[in-house]
Image (cartoon, rainbow, N blue to C red):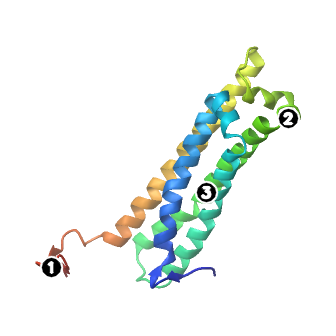
Amino acid sequence: MGLTTFNGVPVHVLLVHAVVVLVPLTALALLACALWPAVLRRFGLALPLLALVSLGFVPLTTDAGEWLAEHVRESALVERHTELGDGLLPWAVGLFVLAAVLGWAAWRPDRSPVWLSVVARQPTDRTAVRVRAAVVALAVLLGTGAVVQVYRIGDSGAQATWQGVSTATTNGAGRLNG
């Protein structure tokens, strides 16, 4: 087990913010780089670096979440959140792999395979257009899957945490009355 708490707060609730920001940001950057060669050349190795950082936060957050799940009351909502959380890693790996491939193509176009070097410039022949279309389709698929999974995980976590709280009333000091 890694980090569990920081200053009395479960680390999971802190780390989850990095995942919620970085994974969709990576998906958006990946799509922009797949669509526009000029953006890809500008990003260069920053794209796979961003994807690697995003990927790194996923198991850290999941690990901290598993620790937290052991320290809260067991419920079907917590179990669902945990199961959904475990499903983000394959999407983050996919984002990283495609980002690494595109980053390599932009950084070393002279040493990339011919089929891959077309992603770093505007394609002109049919084969190059097909390769670009496949890369864009894969970026859309991976990006959409990752963002949807982040949303589903966040929604299930919010439900597990806050179900029943919204019906509570607050006293004059803004504190919840149970």
Single out the residue that lies furthest toward the right.
111
Q: Quarter of the image containing the C terminus? A: bottom left
Residue named by callout 3: 54
Q: Residues within 10 Å of mark 1 (few under 14, many from 20)?
A: few
Are circles 1 and 3 on residues that touch, CB within 8 Å? no
Please identify, in this view, whether the residue under mark 2 or under mark 1 is nearer the observer.
1
Residue 162, percent across and down? 31, 70
Residue named by callout 2: 112
Residue 38, percent across and down? 66, 28
| Distance from Cα at disc 1 to Cα at disc 3 | 39 Å
Please identify, in this view, whether the residue under mark 1 or under mark 3 is nearer the observer.
1
Is residue 73 visible in the rendered structure shown here?
yes
- The kind of residue tagged 2 is Ser
- The kind of residue tagged 1 is Ala
Asked which secondary structure carries label 3, the reply is helix
Q: In this view, does 161 lie to the left or right of 16?
A: left
| Distance from Cα at disc 3 to Cα at disc 2 | 25 Å
Q: Which mark is residue 173?
A: 1
Residue 102, percent across and down? 73, 39
